[in-house]
Image (cartoon, rainbow, N blue to C red):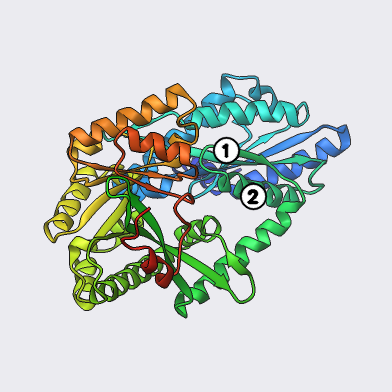
Amino acid sequence: IYGTVQDVTEQALLFRRMRYLADHDTLTGLPNRRAFVERIEHCVKAAGRNQHEMALLFIDLDGFKTVNDSLGHGAGDQLLAHVAERILGHIRSSDALARCGTPDKPAVSRLGGDEFALLLTKVDGAGGTEIVADRLASVLAEPILIDQHEVAVSGSIGISMFPADASTAEDLFTHADQAMYQAKSRGPNNYAFYDQSMDTASLRRLTVASRLRRAVARDEVHVHFQPRLDLRKGAVAGGEALARWKDETLGQVSPAEFIPVAESTGLIIPLGRRVLERSCEQVRGWLDAGYEDFVISVNVSPQQFIRENVVAWVSETLQKYRTPPQFLELEITENLFLGKAESIGDVLRDLRSIGLRIALDDFGTGYSSLSYLLQFPIDTLKIDRCLLKNVPHNDDAAGVVKALIEMSSSLGIRTVAEGVDDEAQADWLDSHGCDEIQGFLISGALESSGFRALLGKRW
């Protein structure tokens, strides 16, 4: 009898490795979408037989794109790995573990990009799920140190319940995804449970994206101007350029709805170009009509700073419309500085060198680092409405705003209070040295002719 013996250890190990790679995300080691969907399908069948409730949490990171664009893909990969560890750590250190499986096989997945999912196979209704979601949101919002940069991201979490919201794995996934978009619409670090109205919201979002792309291509997004009142002069001495869109099918679409869509689809870049061009065109027209004492502020998206040569295209636009730069102010937000503060600072100094003013917008909604005011060439600080909503009636809120005004004044930075809607706020801001106010107390955004009628008008 003759036989051969062959060592197949290497082949077996290779086969096991191939099986592993087929089912797992190589960056985080978590199950991938395919393997996770199979797990959900199995759990749905088991839950149906045993009459258990389940919950699927669909997690999309807030702010990941900014980190990826600012610090590079390597840093983005590190961030994703840290997030995966945090989700696993949260599960293993809490009562969520019993709901998710065993320590070596938690029901967590990286679905792709900056999307993760968590399956709770035994839950005590929506209340028990909400406890897990709330804790998870807190864990995800904690800063992460990457390459000596403190990075702050958070998670938008959509939740779908079985069997209340879905009877199949596919529907459970779809509804959790829809709920995630609802959570994201509420602002960073939120969660939302699915309800049937979200089916309509999801269709609306797709429609807005499609119609907006068409509107931008056809130059159908218009620019209006919201006045800013100079409290020292008691007159309108400038305003903010704001995009406004009325679609022939959708009607008037709120900026709160279409600007996030523009950001997520990349349409914010051509849209931002249009707003700057129309602003320069209007400034030139007002100068030719004899108006000289005003400044128009234009918002610039972080995507424009990252993807374009901002100094070049702004300079070209100024030349094209023969617009003196001192009549324009570029508004930026705090998250622009994330990860690339030094290079962004250089760009801001270049913009200042050609005569443009720089405003830090929405101060109080993001990282709110006071060091930005010392490090970078900031001419104007725009105090967000969230800091002003309880002024002057709340002493703590008033104290914070008062300190910001005094500090800005000592640095030679003008202050503009946003969202001022009543006389009591305006009087308080005036008495505490705020330079300008903007809000519905003065006016909403106006077409160019209406805005021109207010320029220089005494209040």
- Residue 8 marker: none
Residue denoted by label 2: 177
Q: Amino acid at mark 2?
A: Asp
Structural distance between the alpha carbons of marks 1 and 2: 14 Å
Q: Secondary structure at mark 1?
A: loop
- Of residues 455 and 202, the one nearer the viewer is 455
363 versus 235 height, above or below = above
- Of residues 291 and 60, the one nearer the viewer is 291
Percent coordinates x, y for residue 341 in the rendering: 23, 43
**Residue 413 in the figure: left or right of residue 353:** right
Q: Amino acid at mark 1?
A: Asn
- Of residues 92 and 445, the one nearer the viewer is 445
Give the label, 1 or 2, closer to the camera. Answer: 1
For the image, the number of numbered tags is 2
Kindly indicate the quadrant of the structure image that contains residue 128: top right
Quadrant assignment for the N terminus: top right
Q: Residue furthest bottom?
A: 218
Percent coordinates x, y for residue 70 in the rendering: 30, 48
Residue at 66 percent of width and 47 percent of height: 179
The numbered mark, 1 or 2, whose residue comes first in the sequence reads 2
Q: Secondary structure at mark 2?
A: helix
Q: Answer yes or no: is residue 84 visible.
A: yes
Percent coordinates x, y for residue 360 in the rendering: 30, 46
Kindly indicate the quadrant of the structure image that contains residue 236: bottom left
Q: Mark 1 packing: few (<14 Cα in 10 Å), some, or many (20+)?
A: many
Kindly indicate the quadrant of the structure image that contains residue 192: top right
**Residue 59 in the figure: left or right of residue 282:** right
Residue denoted by label 1: 190
Percent coordinates x, y for residue 20 in the rendering: 54, 43
Residue at 35 percent of width and 72 percent of height: 278
